[in-house]
Image (cartoon, grey):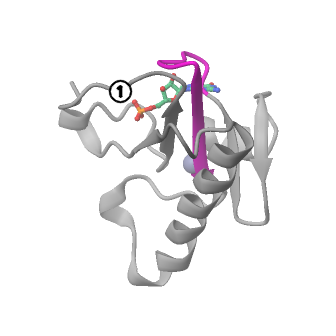
Amino acid sequence: MDCIFCKIAAKQIPSAIVYENEDVIAFRDINPQAPVHIIIIPKQHIATLNDIKPEDAQLVGKIVLAAQAIAKDNNLQNPGYRLVLNCNKDAGQTVFHIHCHLLGGRLMGWPPG
Ligand code: 5GP
Ligand code: ZN
């Protein structure tokens, strides 16, 4: 499968990995939008949020728990951080392997762009 995030998960493409377990891997975004900008993905390929099935519920939970651990590692629990999941064109999804952005280290604006 020609998916850049599958290749990162398989370590066929190098990335700055910050967290990994059996199901999930996280690495620094190549084009960071905040002092801390980490991408958390399932190792399993799922194209968009629309494709998540009820049996993936535990896997999705593991992504959020990974984010929590990474936020702690980066001392972001307080003052806080933001998780972003983009789905399809209007949200600006550019890589079609689901991923959670962890953004922190600066004050976030609201509403998001
Ligand atoms: P999306 O816009 O799909 O929600 O986010 C995709 C993110 O992946 C972008 O923030 C982009 O900078 C990041 N990205 C795309 N290709 C690569 C890559 O090859 N390596 C890394 N580390 N990040 C990537
Ligand atoms: Zn993939």
Name the one closer to the observer, 32 or 35.
35
Three-letter amino acid code at disc 1? Met
Image x and y of residue 64, in percent: 53, 60
User: As drawn, which residue projects farthest toward the front?
Assistant: 78
Q: Is residue 8 positioned above or below 44 on the image? A: above
Image x and y of residue 110, in percent: 21, 30
Image x and y of residue 26, in percent: 68, 44
Query: Is 49 contained in the magenta span?
Result: no
Say left or right for 88 vs 111.
right
User: As drawn, which residue projects farthest toward the bottom?
Assistant: 55
The residue wearing badge 1 is: 108
Q: Which residues are magenta?
A: 29-42
Q: Residues within 10 Å of mark 1 (few under 14, many from 20)?
A: few
Query: Is 41 contained in the magenta span?
Result: yes
Image x and y of residue 47, in percent: 43, 53
Name the one closer to the observer, 67 or 2.
67
Residue 49 visible:
yes
In the rendered image, which quarter is residue 16 located in?
Answer: top right
